[in-house]
Amino acid sequence: MKKVFLCFFAAGFSACAFGQNTVLLDMRQDVNLLRREVGQLRLEVEQLRSENQALKESLDALKNSSVGGESVRAQVASAKAAMAAQNSALKNEIIQSVKKDIDSLAMQTDAAIQKLTRAINAQPAAAQPARTFGTDYPKSGIKYVVRSGDSISKIAREHNSRQSWILDANEISDPRMLRVGAEIFIPQQ
């Protein structure tokens, strides 16, 4: 999406880009708020885990002691069951809360993207001047496979050719659209 913004900005549509940047800033703020809330939920979960570990250790100590016999063991089992139920309920509550926040953020992000798309589509396309291709180039030359890092000017220098010849011979209207792996003809004298 940044490329689209830059193209429109460069073409003189700065007002559109400003409105879109505001939407993106709002989305970033929402994401940061969600991160903080998830961080708080993680802290709460860690505290609960710590408390549960302490309770488990206490229960294990009681369970292993010989004082109270069956009565203590029954109470320990009951406490463990209650603790497990409480943990499960709390876990479900946290999951639902996070899911609700994520769903809300997803809806806001979707709305922002749709708004951005409408704004971009509402802008008239910049008119590209029609490029005509000449035939005034040498008909002899070589075939060349474009490699990473190549540009029309680099290829022309390395193969004793001219940029205009290469563009005309291969009917390339935009030199920036040169693709790696494409086979082109390089006219040479």
Image (cartoon, rainbow, N blue to C red):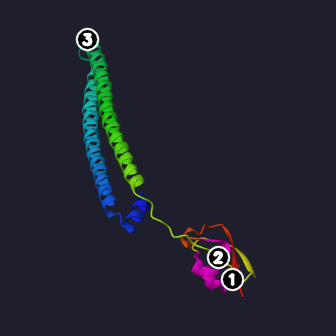
The amino acid on which the numbered mark 3 sits, given as a three-letter code, is: Ser
Camera-side residue: 110 or 167?
167
Q: Is residue 140 left or right of residue 51?
A: right
The amino acid on which the numbered mark 2 sits, given as a three-letter code, is: Asp
Residue position for label 2: 168
Q: Which label is found at residue 71?
A: 3
* Residue range corresponding to the magenta coloring: 150-172
Camera-side residue: 108 or 33?
108
Going 35% across and 36% down the picture, which residue do you hit?
103
Q: First in sequence: mark 3 or mark 1?
A: 3
Q: CA distance from mark 3 to mark 1?
A: 102 Å
Camera-side residue: 58 or 157?
157
Q: Is residue 159 magenta?
A: yes
Q: Are marks 2 and 1 in contact (CB under 8 Å)?
A: yes
Q: Is residue 22 magenta?
A: no
Q: CA distance from mark 3 to mark 2?
A: 95 Å
Q: Is residue 150 left or right of residue 87?
A: right
